[in-house]
Image (cartoon, rainbow, N blue to C red):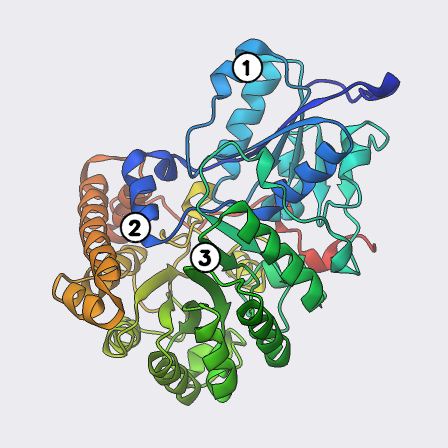
Amino acid sequence: MSGIVNQHEGGKILKIVFITPASSLRRIPVYRWGGKIYGQSNSITGPLILGGILKKAGHDVSVYEELNASVPIKKMLKADDVDVFCFSIMTSNAPRAYELADLIHQKTHARVLMGGMHASVCTQEALLHADQVIMGEGEKVILNVVEGRITDRLVTGIPVCNLDEVPFPDYSILKTPCDAANVISSRGCPFRCTFCTTSRMFAPYRQRSVDNVIEEIRMYKKLGFQYMNFEDDNFTADKERAKEICRRMIAENLTFKETFFFGRTDLADDDEMLQLLHDAHLTRVLIGIESLNQNALNSIHKGQNIENIKRAAAACKRHKIRMIASIVLGLDDDTLEDMNKSIEFAKSIDAYQLQPAILTPYPGTPVYENMVAEGRMISTTWEDFDMMNVTFVPKNETPWELQQEFYHAAKYFYDFRSCHRIGELFGREYGFRRFGLAIMTRLGSFGAGIAAKVAPSSVYYRLKHFADGKEPGTKALEYPKEFSFRFADAPAR
């Protein structure tokens, strides 16, 4: 690895490249095509904010989102003119980040920095591949780290108390396609579901002022964006604030063709807010139904009941807000029958889309700690941790049965007959999108089935053989202690 030196002495302009890597599956063209059918392409805001800070300081900054397009990494390595590479990593893309980081160290003299959810938890692992790791929020330390004034290998970020101080994302430095602008009007979430990482990394829950949010939205209108996403974990957590943002968007003509947001079932309690959401074109919402089994909901500290779920579904339908129903597959209190009931419910309420998410024990969460303590983890391959693959031993079915349930849920929900229904409810464009998703789910299911039979290196082969008992020596795997870091154990800030 390269040494850490003060490369900014004498006012040198540094060439800095931010890369948000993507796993091998997400880099194949058919997956990128499927992503465009599911929704509008966007870029995570962290690198755009941090890169904007560095650009303002006079540096040459570029940002790449590998999910949306190939990154010219070979060209960069050959030129060897990049001073600092920065990687924003989550658990499933960590192996790709490590692969690129090792290649950079082999081929160039550049420094490598890492940050993000996974690097903030598995710090010692990330340090095997990076010169420095920033743990937590990076806005207040990034410039000093890049310019060499902070040389510690593990850097503890400083949380931003007043979010209005955070610069807006700088889309001028983004080099890969992006159709939707992302706005994060708050950090964290008032709720603490046991499987959630963001509510722990971004604690405590903080909000930006309405004026500050509107100023950022105004910027995106001037930039010509037609789509926008509120990426808050729960945009409607503060209902009066959500209403005021919507009122301002309507009054100042700051609406977009479509705006996506994350919400909870309690949005059904406020008809005024629902109407404002609709009128401000916030017409696509992901709501975590998770399960229709109350014991399962209680076990993950969801803070909602079955009646809340039903009322939210009816309210969204009444106000013509297209609902993405998120269902967690594999909760300890759920059987396959329970999961199928949840999928059937999502279809019966004319949910626009389904997000079947296999319970994934992410490092730093109570679910992960419990699974490790119980010896139920069966994967140490971080690429598997993407909510589409089984990584643990379920209580009520085999790992392969749970994996099959994921594809069964997607195929059952995205059947071809429903395309016409969705087109009637929301318009022809959305009916065509549903048709595309129906094709994609069948291709994915077919590919997984083939891999389970003939590809020993695939997660599907491992899961099927684990279930069939064809590998008698297979058992739950133990994780190194340094990978069991929890956000709550972070040094005091």
Q: Which mark is residue 360?
A: 3
Q: Which mark is residue 77?
A: 1
Residue 180 image point, x, y percent: 47, 50
Q: Where the C terminus falls, by quadrant?
A: bottom right
At label 3, which amino acid type do we have?
Thr
At label 1, which amino acid type do we have?
Leu
Q: Report whether 400 appears left or right of 421.
A: right
**Occupied quadrant, residue 172:** top right
Residue at the disc numbered 2: 37
Q: Report whether 15 appears left or right of 465.
A: right
At label 2, which amino acid type do we have?
Ile
Answer yes or no: do the residues labelled 2 and 1 have beta carbons within 8 Å? no
**Occupied quadrant, residue 306:** bottom left
Q: Which mark is residue 438?
A: none
Q: Image point 32% across, 56% down: which residue?
A: 399
Q: Is residue 379 visible?
A: yes
Pointer 3 or 2: first along the chain? 2
Foreground of the two, 269 or 154: 269
Answer above or below: position of 229 versus 81: below
Foreground of the two, 70 or 248: 248
Residue ranking furthest to the left: 417
Q: Image point 51% across, 86% down: which residue?
A: 272
Answer above or below: position of 3 versus 180: above
Q: Residues within 10 Å of mark 2 (few under 14, many from 20)?
A: some
Residue 299 image point, x, y percent: 50, 76
**Nearest-to-viewer mark from 3 and 2:** 2
Q: Residues within 10 Å of mark 1 (few under 14, many from 20)?
A: some
Q: Residues within 10 Å of mark 3 (few under 14, many from 20)?
A: many
Residue 235 image point, x, y percent: 56, 69
**Occupied quadrant, residue 326:** bottom left
